[in-house]
Amino acid sequence: MRDNQTMNELTKKLNEYERQKKAYDDSKEEARKQGHEALMEWYDNGPDKPEYPLTGGQAKAWSLWYWNEREEMNFDDFVWESEAKDFIDTLRAAGVKTFTVTNSSTALMENMHWFQQNGCTLMGLCEVEETDEWNRKHYGNKMGVRFAL
């Protein structure tokens, strides 16, 4: 799952954004160092701030992929209604077949409905082993639900 064309393309977009943002921030810092007049000139005529290249749904899907080392990815967050379609479409484009959700916020019910409205099938309840980010420390099991894309 680590070498994934869809997610690798999003990674390239994010890396390019970070490069542009650093150049933008560096130019602002240089103007700041030159004094008030230079900084005001920079604000009036400086470069445009780079736009973040991913939608909220794409960013959450990418983050889920990037930080997850498991065979079946576990989503312990929630999406807003405006992010649900892009989240599911991005996972689907990446070839994800199933994922689990262990988020227990008040948004869980809405998320379950939005996932189904975007073509996911609720497979049922499950338990997911809870670990640290590196899957080294095990904390026990967490209740969740499984979805198929």
Image: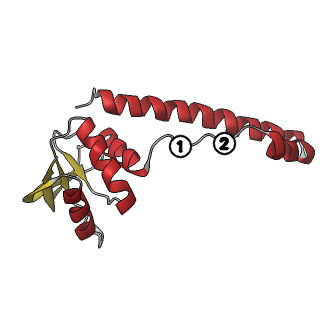
Tag 2: residue type? Lys
Q: Is residue 50 above or below residue 15?
A: below
Depth check, front residue: 58 or 118: 118
Q: Is residue 102 left or right of residue 77?
A: left
Residue 142 position in % (x across, y down):
16, 61
Viewer-closest of 95 and 118: 118
| Callout 2 secondary element | loop
**Horizontal relation, residue 3 to residue 38: left or right:** left
Label 2: few (<14), some (14–19) or many (≥20) C-alpha neighbours in 10 Å = few
Which residue is drawn at the image coordinates 76% and 41% (left, top)? 28
Rendered image: mark on residue 112: none
Question: SS of the residue at dot 1?
Answer: loop
Q: Quadrant of residue 66?
A: top left
**How many numbered discs?**
2
The residue lying furthest to the right in this view is 37
- Tell me the number on the disc at residue 49: 2
Mark 1 residue type: Tyr
Residue at image mark 1: 52
Query: Which of the 4 image quarters holds residue 143?
Result: bottom left
Residue 118 location in percent, x, y? Answer: 24, 54
Residue 29: x and y, percent?
76, 40
Q: Residue furthest bottom?
A: 106
**Are dots 2 and 1 in contact, CB under 8 Å?**
no
Residue 73 placement, left or right of 18 = left
The quarter of the rendered structure image containing the N terminus is: top left
Residue 3 at x, y percent in the picture? 28, 26
Q: Residue drawn at (31%, 26%), measured in percent from left and top?
A: 5
